[in-house]
């Protein structure tokens, strides 16, 4: 049985995911220098560095709407199992998105991105509908 706790663990995983991708970026190029991190990335010739950095940035961008969706759905009284299921699917798709980004598979990466985006939309729409029904 899926619980709201599962969804909250997914929020934690989604919050940490960008750091996994940046670790891959930093370990894929020449020796990393923290003196000028953005300049260091710009100077790297290994495409994997840039793909992993792109995955990191995209993961940061995706986090806030996802976390808001989980919290708003919970506050609105959306079924906890539904919230947890959407959260799990989101995290799986976001991990897949990052792996496909680093692996330079743009069409599949876009599909994973879109699937995760739909999960966020469903969380937000269900929260709005639930609140609208009780207002």
Image (tube, helix red, strand yellow):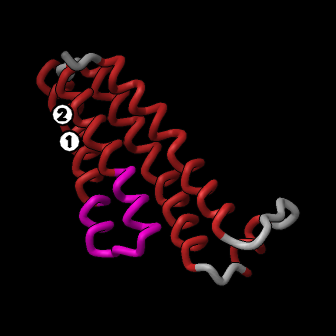
Check if residue 122 falls in the magenta segment: no
The x and y percentages for residue 29 are 69, 71
Q: Magenta segment, which residues?
A: 94-113
> Does the magenta stretch mainly form a helix, a strand or a loop?
helix
- Disc 2 residue crowd, few under 14, some 14–19, many 20+, Cα 10 Å: many
Which residue lies under the disc numbered 2? 126
> Could you tell me which residue is drawn at 43 percent across and 33 percent down?
11
Q: What element carries label 1?
A: helix
The x and y percentages for residue 74 are 30, 21
What's the CA distance linking mark 2 and mark 1? 6 Å
> Could you tell me which residue is drawn at 73 percent across and 81 percent down?
43
Res 122 label: 1
Where the C terminus falls, by quadrant? top left
From what the image shows, is residue 94 above or below residue 105?
above
From what the image shows, is residue 43 above or below residue 62?
below
Q: Give the quadrant of residue 89.
A: top left
From what the image shows, is residue 95 above or below residue 25?
above
> Could you tell me which residue is drawn at 26 percent across and 22 percent down?
76
The x and y percentages for residue 25 are 62, 63
Res 24 label: none
Q: Is mark 2 on a helix, strand or loop?
A: helix
The x and y percentages for residue 50 are 58, 73
60 sits left or right of 73 in the view:
right
Q: Residue furthest left?
A: 133
Task: Tell whether label 1 touches label 2 (CB within 8 Å).
Answer: yes
Q: Which of 135 and 101 is in front in this view?
A: 101
17 sits left or right of 131 in the view:
right
Where the N terminus falls, by quadrant? top left
């Amino acid at each position: 049985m899926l619980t709201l706790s599962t969804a909250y663990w997914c929020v934690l995983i989604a919050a940490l995911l960008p750091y996994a991708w940046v670790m891959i970026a930093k370990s894929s190029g020449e020796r990393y220098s923290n003196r000028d991190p953005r300049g260091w990335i710009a100077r790297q010739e290994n495409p994997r560095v840039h793909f992993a950095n792109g995955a990191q940035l995209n993961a940061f961008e995706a986090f806030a709407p996802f976390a808001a969706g989980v919290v708003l759905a919970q506050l609105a009284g959306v079924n906890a199992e539904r919230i947890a299921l959407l959260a799990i699917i989101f995290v799986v798709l976001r991990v897949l998105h990052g792996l496909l980004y680093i692996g330079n598979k743009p069409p599949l990466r876009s599909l994973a991105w879109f699937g995760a985006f739909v999960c966020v939309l469903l969380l937000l729409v269900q929260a709005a509908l639930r609140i609208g029904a009780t207002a």
